[in-house]
Amino acid sequence: METNNNKTNLKEPLGFGKTMLASAVGVAIAFVALNVIGFIMGIAFLAAAMSSASGSSTPITGDHIAIEMDLTVPIYERTPSEFMTIVGSSKGTSIEQLLLGIEHAAADSRIEALYLHLGGSGLDWAQAEELQEALMRFRQQSDKPIIAYGESMSQPEYFLATSADKIAVHPSGMIDFRGIGAEVVFYKGLLDKLGVHMELIRPTSCAYKSAGETYVRTDMSDANREQVRSYINSTWNYALQVMSQNRNISPQQLNHIADNLLGSLPDEALKSHLVDTLCFEQDIKSMLKNSHGVQRIVKANRYAQSISSNTHPNRIALIYAEGNVVDGTGNGSVAVYGDDIVEALNAAAKDAKVKAIVMRVNSPGGAVTASESMTKAVIEAKKKKPVIVSMSGLAASAGYEISCFATKIVAHPTTLTGSIGVFATIPEISNLLRQKLGVTTDTVMTNKNSTGLSLYRPLTPDARAMLQKNVEDFYITFTQRVADGRHLSRTYVDSIARGRVWTGIQAKQIGLVDTLGGLPLAFRIAAEEAQVDFDECSIKVFPAEKSLWEEIMEQVSDEQDEKILAKINAIIPFYSDLVSWSQMEPIQARLPFAIKLY
């Protein structure tokens, strides 16, 4: 009886189905719990970040301040959004913030000095010019000192530093002062070893459109070498003139210093009078305190955020076109998205408060289809109000096409522009597959050119002729657009086009731009063209930046998931990473090569 009682008290084991069901329910509950916890943590993080971000625009109190222009971080054209800053996509500052800070610091009685902290920003020559012009205006409007310091300085950074009253470098640092060199990388040898043959299709007259040459040559063509030599000499000669005037060193002596590397090492830079002193950053801060009465240092972007924007009823629209030209709408990366720019131009043209439009272009070009759409939008906007283009470092190829119908074009002396032309490249990989990988292909066709554009066999004569006609036709369209926009003959435009790159100085001489200067000049020209007083205008960026919460909610919506998963993953850790790659259009209008100016 006792044994039977014990047996009756034991529970029967669960069957296999019940066990699996219980496990599944447990896993589901755990998954939901973890997601809820993760979501709560993400919201808490965002709330804290939003609170921090909202506090960043609070007024700066106190006086005896030095404004630090931090050029040790990446420099962008447009101020990164709060969302991108929070998720860590953008750690730098912007030309927009730096210009605003310099402009207001001149008349701000609380500001005692400007401190240029240089090194590692990736500043290009045109951006350095933009800031240099702002610093020269600062010096004209106030007697406050400008102090420049860096552990190392690139040549554009040193060019900017010459605007300062005093230049200091770290005792173990370096100044890159050796003139401008340009290097182009060629891949033909590698492609030959891999068994890949690249076809380059370009208009017969576009010898300077040399982008595809990196795949079909092992060195520069004569035309490419000619244009590169021309524009690096133009850039260097302009830089020499400015640095010579600012440092009171003759251009001949500066060239001697560059030829013999007499300014690279700190001691030699001091001896050559490129710098005024060797010291540490702490010494600069002590000097600002002891010699100029500075009690604290505030970053320029923080200072710019604290400045209240004016509320004048007349507005000038500012549209940024920065990066490669691509089709579609933005997904968070820096690019000129055709649909976004068209929408911004249309919205600014319809806004009754907007009296003129300034488009800031910093682009090497890209997709022809997007370029055509934006050019059409510029033409339509110009019918309603003035459209002024302000060129930054690059406004080439498609970047020039979207500019050419502007009421006026403003460029920096070292802006790289022009490159009016088009090309196509088609790879053929049959040898790679057959000889290297043992892969062969076969085909069945309904028509003789059904596989005429295949990657697995050479172009057919008909396919090559079709592509050649395509690029020839678009080149005629491109040059005609420039002729119409700039009020020139197409014959003349063809003579200065042909894919050739020009500096801003050269472009002004041949009629591709109207005047030399930066974004502030473009604003004033826009006001003049609209017949309004610039001092009674406010600047409005189009499209308007969304609030932090709006951007977050948009990014997590179903239709945006694939665009933002990588960014959301930085906030809510249970999202997987996703990298989105833009698909390049077959026919491209872009700068003829990826090149670095040293």
Image (cartoon, grey):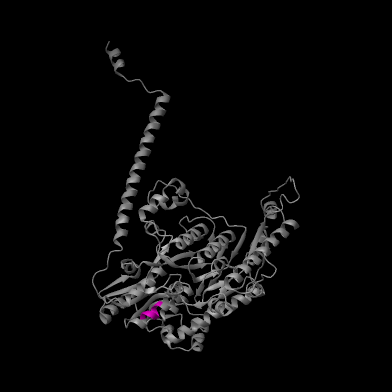
Residue at image point 68% right, 49% down: 438
Rendering quarter of residue 307: bottom left
Rendering quarter of residue 85: bottom left
Which x, y percent locates residue 207?
A: 67, 71
Is the magenta region chiefly helix, strand or loop? helix
Q: Is residue 387 left or right of residue 480?
A: left
Residue at image point 51% right, 85% down: 255
Which x, y percent locates residue 236?
A: 52, 80
Whether residue 567 appears in magenta in the rendering, the answer is no
Instruction: Please name whichever residue, 83 or 404, is drawn nearer the observer in this view of the structure.
Output: 404
Taking the view exactly as shown, the residue that stands out farthest to the top is 1
Residue at image point 50% right, 53% down: 580
Q: Is residue 312 left or right of residue 447?
A: left
Which x, y percent locates residue 514?
A: 52, 76
Q: Is residue 200 left or right of residue 252?
A: right
Taking the view exactly as shown, the residue that stands out farthest to the left is 62
Which x, y percent locates residue 301?
A: 35, 68
Instruction: Please name whichever residue, 362 or 118, is drawn nearer the observer in this view of the structure.
Output: 362
Q: Is residue 377 left or right of residue 543?
A: right
Rendering quarter of residue 474: bottom right
Magenta range is: 134-138
Examine the rendered structure and indicate whether residue 71 appears above or below residue 197.
below
Using the rendered image of the protein, determine whether residue 74 is visible from the camera's viewpoint. Answer: no
Q: Quadrant of the N terminus?
A: top left
Whether residue 136 appears in magenta in the rendering, the answer is yes
